[in-house]
Amino acid sequence: MRSLREIRGLKYPDEFVVRHFFKRGLGERTGRVLELGSGTGNNLSLYQTWDWTCVGVDYDAGALADARHNLGEGPEFIQADLSKGLPPLTGPFDALIIPNLLCYLTLNQAKAVLGGLKPLLAAGAEVFVRTRLVDDYRYGRGVEEEPDGFRLATPETGEAGLFNRFYTQHGLVDLLVETLGLTDRNELAVRFDNLQAGRRVPGNSDLVVWGRVP
């Protein structure tokens, strides 16, 4: 893995990925972890440091090239458009992290991806999901394409033209229970302002859910 100065893209893991990792004791064991929407590998760098076997999936070839530069030859990175379903994957995985993906999938696409993951997860596998809630700044700023799903018109967030789906807290938890059978859950609301494109964007609102599969 590269030194911090040599890292391309985001240099640090999502703080709630870090919290999940240590609060659930994942630094005290090893296994195989799968990240969907892995980007440049900043979240998987935490797992790699603690000797986990890492697999990342992302649609962006440039981000995957940066991830391979950042993390070296150990992890496996797969290019795939998850709106079209999962690529071929070999389980079992002992941890699944989805920190920034579900908001870009329609509800049916999310159900297909999560349902396809269930047989790939080991018994007791840890699951981490973070996605946007219906009180997020972006909600309703665009053309509605499905209930709570919009083609965004928000150039200030860099997402103009992208599809975003927003969840209620119960809706997200119910989805994870339905598709993965998630148990032993924790739910954390995350609300924050951000600076994007030179302006303050208020009212970002996410829900973090972690738990285990049976």
Image (tube, rainbow, N blue to C red):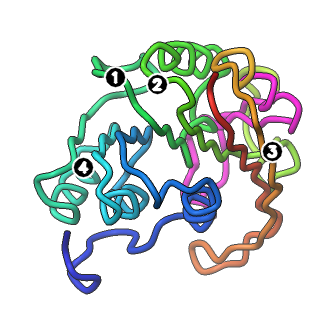
Q: Earlier in the sequence, mark 4 or mark 3?
A: 4
The magenta-colored residue range is 148-175
Is residue 152 within the magenta segment? yes
Determine which residue is flagged by label 1: 91
Left/right placement of residue 133 relative to residue 83 reads right
The residue mark sitting in front, 3 or 2, is 2
Q: Quadrant of residue 10?
A: bottom left
Q: Are the residues at dot 2 and dot 1 in contact (C-beta closer than 8 Å)?
A: yes
Left/right placement of residue 131 relative to residue 14 reads right
Q: Are the residues at dot 2 and dot 4 in contact (C-beta closer than 8 Å)?
A: no
Q: Which one is in front, 78 or 84? A: 78
Q: Quadrant of residue 189?
A: bottom right
Local crowd at mark 1 within 10 Å, few (<14), some, or many (≥20)? some
Label 4, secondary structure: give it.
helix
The residue mark sitting in front, 3 or 1, is 1
Determine which residue is flagged by label 2: 122
Judge whether 168 appears above or below 159 on screen: above
Local crowd at mark 2 within 10 Å, few (<14), some, or many (≥20)? some
